[in-house]
Every structure is written in C-alpha cells, then in structure tokens.
Amino acid sequence: MSLLAWIVAFCLVGGVLSVLAAGLFLVLPESVRARLLPHLVSFATGALLGAAFLALLPHAVGAPGVEPHRIMLAVLLGLLAFFILERLVLWRHCHEAACEVHGAEGEPDRHAAGTLVLFGDGLHNFIDGILIGAAFLTDVHLGVVTALAVAAHEIPQEVGDFAVLLHSGYSHARALLFNILSSLTTVVGGVLAWLALPGVSGWIPYVLAVAAASFIYVAVADLIPDLHKRVDRKALAEQLLLILAGVLVIYFAHGTLHD
C-alpha cells in the first residue's frame, strides 16, 4: 500500500467516516444522545491529549538535528495561532444541540449559522488533513494514531454541527451531504501535505508540533470547558475514567503499531 493511499484512507477515516458516525448517532433517541455525548467528549479529550504528548511531540522532539526549544516555540505559536483563528474565522466546535451563531447585534442568526459552521468545519478539516499527512510522512504508525485522534474528536463535533445545520433549516439529507462535502477537505489537506512536505522535510517536525498544539488547544479550550458543566462527583469519576481510556487507547495503539 503506497504512502499516498495510507494518507487518503485515513483522512477519510478522520473526516468522512466521522461524519457518517455522527449521522448515525443522530438516529438514536434524543434521551440516549444526551447521555452519550458527554462521554464521547470525555473520551475525545483523552485521545487528543494522548496523541499530542505520547505520539506527536516525542516524534517532533526526537527528529534528527531538531532543537527541542524550537519545537516548544512552535507549539506555543501554534496555540496562539489557533486561538486567533478561532476568534477571527470561526474555526469552532460545538458539542451541544442548542449551539447558535450570533449576529452583529448579539441575536442568534439562524440563517448565517449553517454557512459559518460549514466554512469553519471545512477549514478545520483541511488543517487536520495536513497534520495527518505530515504524521504519515514521518511514520505510518504515527499517521494512524493521529488519524484516530482526529476521528475521536470529530464525531462529537460533527454531532454539534448537524444540530446547527438542522436548526438553520437544512433537511437531514442536505445536512448530511454538506457535512460530507466539508469533510472531504481533510483529503485535500492530506494530499497537499504529501505533495509539498517531502520537498521541505526539515519542516515536518514543526508541522507535528503544530499538530500537537491543535490537539492540545481543542482539548483544553473546547472540550474541557464542556466537561466543567457537570459538577457532581459521579460525573467527575466518569470523566476521569473516560479521559484515561482515551489516553490508554492512544498509548497502546501507538505501542502496538510499533511492535
């Protein structure tokens, strides 16, 4: 199997298959979705942090001729860049059924919400594709782990995106179609990485650092605040167990693939 085939296949896993999984999730009764979605967010938090600290950063820091301080600077700059990107162009996540986009006067703008979410999701998926491609160019096993982490956080995000589109007046069929089209930008990003990055291979460790920054930012800025909304001790125990489960899945997947 060629490297390009690996990249395309796992970009589809991280993008299109996560959309389809989210679409199937919406078929479940609303009461079941309400119970399961917080658990998916907890698991995704662990998977993202595990992929960042146990897979991406060790490969970036361990690359030949790379200074660790520069890698850490790339992570820091990446975190700041994703903060700015989220504020300026709605590179956003939504994990609730009542997500809204507000207009200039602060009132919910349902008509604009669908377009803005699709734009933000397409941009985010394109970036995910570049990061998956860079991971595969470093090591096939790292690429698999990176794609799995992307899929883990894309499913709860796509559930929220579906909710916004439906709330904006899209039919179920149109919401699914436009979400799939948006997810295909993951493949575009992956193919672009395959074409461009081999010629500048010295940049790949820094792209991995930015990938780690992306995962850390999503986990800390988007997912963990959602977890804080549940304050009872039972919820805390469930969240910790599922976060740990997400970390362990990445840990064992990365270790097993390298054996």
Image: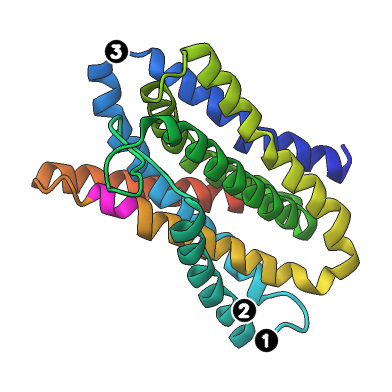
Which residue appears at 60% of the width and 61% of the height? 211
The overriding secondary structure of the stretch rendered in magenta is: helix
Q: Which residue is mark 2?
A: 71
Quarter in which the N terminus is drawn: top right
For the residues marked 1 and 3, what is the alpha-carbon distance in whole angstroms?
52 Å
User: In what element is the residue under mark 3?
Assistant: loop
Dot placed on the residue nearer the N-terminal end, 1 or 3: 3
Q: Decide which of 243, 112 is in the foreground and name it.
A: 112
Disc marking residue 205: none
Callout 1–callout 3 Cβ contact below 8 Å: no
Q: Decide which of 164, 138 is in the foreground and name it.
A: 164
For the residues marked 2 and 3, what is the alpha-carbon distance in whole angstroms?
45 Å
Magenta region includes residue 226? yes
Left or right of residue 44, residue 75 in this image: right
Q: Which residue is mark 1?
A: 67
Which residue appears at 75% of the width and 47% of the height? 190
Classify residue 178 by image quadrant. Answer: top right
Three-letter code for the amino acid on which mark 2 is drawn: Ile
